[in-house]
Image (tube, rainbow, N blue to C red):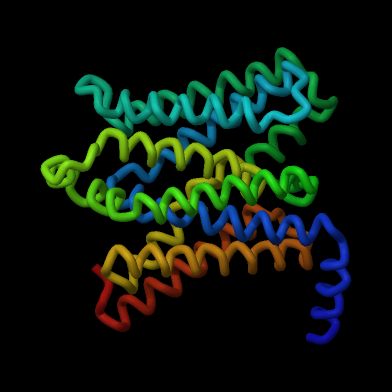
């Protein structure tokens, strides 16, 4: 055990390891805040749809030779989040169908563009794998990227805290929220934009294919034990941060893929909380 701690202390001397831990904790915290809302609104797969859009946007940024692709990716993902919201309210194209349509289309177009214009590197398979699964990108962050992530994370937390009661009302009953004077459409739009920001941030941590796990698993785990919206949200945030931190530490020490290791921790936590919920008789 002492060898393990000494090895960890040695790794923590490197700035890129400290950057990864800071960004990982911030992203995990942000990702968990709206997970409860998405689960209760039956919109859990929006993370998949937007993450695939972000993958396509990254391919476009690579073709344009942009040194910093985050502004373009954030813009395209945010616009797609708004389109998903509008399309999901269409009577002819329901929410799940619109997510599937945009998700598959963006992923296919992004991969096609990377094949037609292989400008990022000679190792196309490695680039795609890193983008989809977040294998090494979290360990190559610069100080500027860490600062940007911290600023966006603070904004996400501030927006959630400021509009907490309105998000709560819209989550459970939009008709009642409208009757009380809450502009439900604007609240849904705000949720979509915040989710888009979270998706772009989380791509560096777990990759585009695993983002939904980071958003959904902590919320589902907390729901196994707690019942109130506030307690579920707080427990989800704490659980997400703990799982991300443990996943990062295990990944650094064992040399496993970062994203997959964090998701494995989330799965283990879900199994544990499900067992606790059944034993305590609180599982809904």
In this rendered view, identify the residue nearer to me: 192 or 242: 192
In this rendered view, identify the residue nearer to me: 153 or 277: 153
Q: Is residue 189 left or right of residue 127?
A: left
Could you tell me residue 76's position as x and y percent?
Answer: 54, 25
Residue for point 73% across, 16% down: 64
Could you tell me residue 160's position as x and y percent?
Answer: 41, 52
Residue for point 22% across, 20% down: 92
Residue for point 11% across, 42% down: 179
Say which quadrant the N terminus sits in: bottom right
In this rendered view, identify the residue nearer to me: 56 or 29: 29
Q: Is residue 146 above or below residue 74?
A: below
Residue for point 64% across, 51% down: 150
Could you tell me residue 142's position as x and y percent?
Answer: 80, 46
How many numbered marks are there?
A: 0
Q: Is residue 77 left or right of residue 246?
A: left
Q: Is residue 1 left or right of residue 76?
A: right
Q: Is residue 59 above or below residue 168?
A: above
Say which quadrant the C terminus sits in: bottom left
Q: Quadrant of residue 184?
A: top left
């Amino acid at each position: 055990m002492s060898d393990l701690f000494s090895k960890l202390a040695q790794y923590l001397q490197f700035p890129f390891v400290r950057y990864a831990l800071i960004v990982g904790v911030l992203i995990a915290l942000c990702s968990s805040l709206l997970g409860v809302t998405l689960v209760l609104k039956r919109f859990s797969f929006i993370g998949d749809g937007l993450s695939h859009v972000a993958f396509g946007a990254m391919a476009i940024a690579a073709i344009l030779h942009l040194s910093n692709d985050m502004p373009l990716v954030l813009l395209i993902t945010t616009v797609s989040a708004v389109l998903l919201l509008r399309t999901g309210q269409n009577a002819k194209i329901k929410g799940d169908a619109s997510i599937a349509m945009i998700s598959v289309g963006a992923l296919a177009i992004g991969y096609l563009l990377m094949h037609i214009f292989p400008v990022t590197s000679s190792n196309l398979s490695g680039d795609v794998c890193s983008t989809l699964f977040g294998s090494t990108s979290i360990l190559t962050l610069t100080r500027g990227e860490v600062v940007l992530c911290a600023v966006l994370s603070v904004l996400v937390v501030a927006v959630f805290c400021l509009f907490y009661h309105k998000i709560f009302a819209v989550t459970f009953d939009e008709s009642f929220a409208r009757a009380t004077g809450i502009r439900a459409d604007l609240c849904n739009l705000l949720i979509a934009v915040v989710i888009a920001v979270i998706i772009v941030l989380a791509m560096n941590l777990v990759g585009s294919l695993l983002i939904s796990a980071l958003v959904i698993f902590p919320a589902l785990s907390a729901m196994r034990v707690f019942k109130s919206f506030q307690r579920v949200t707080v427990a989800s945030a704490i659980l997400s941060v703990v799982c991300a931190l443990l996943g990062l530490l295990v990944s650094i020490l064992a040399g496993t893929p970062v994203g997959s290791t964090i998701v494995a921790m989330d799965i283990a936590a879900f199994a544990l909380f499900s067992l606790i919920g059944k034993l305590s008789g609180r599982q809904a």
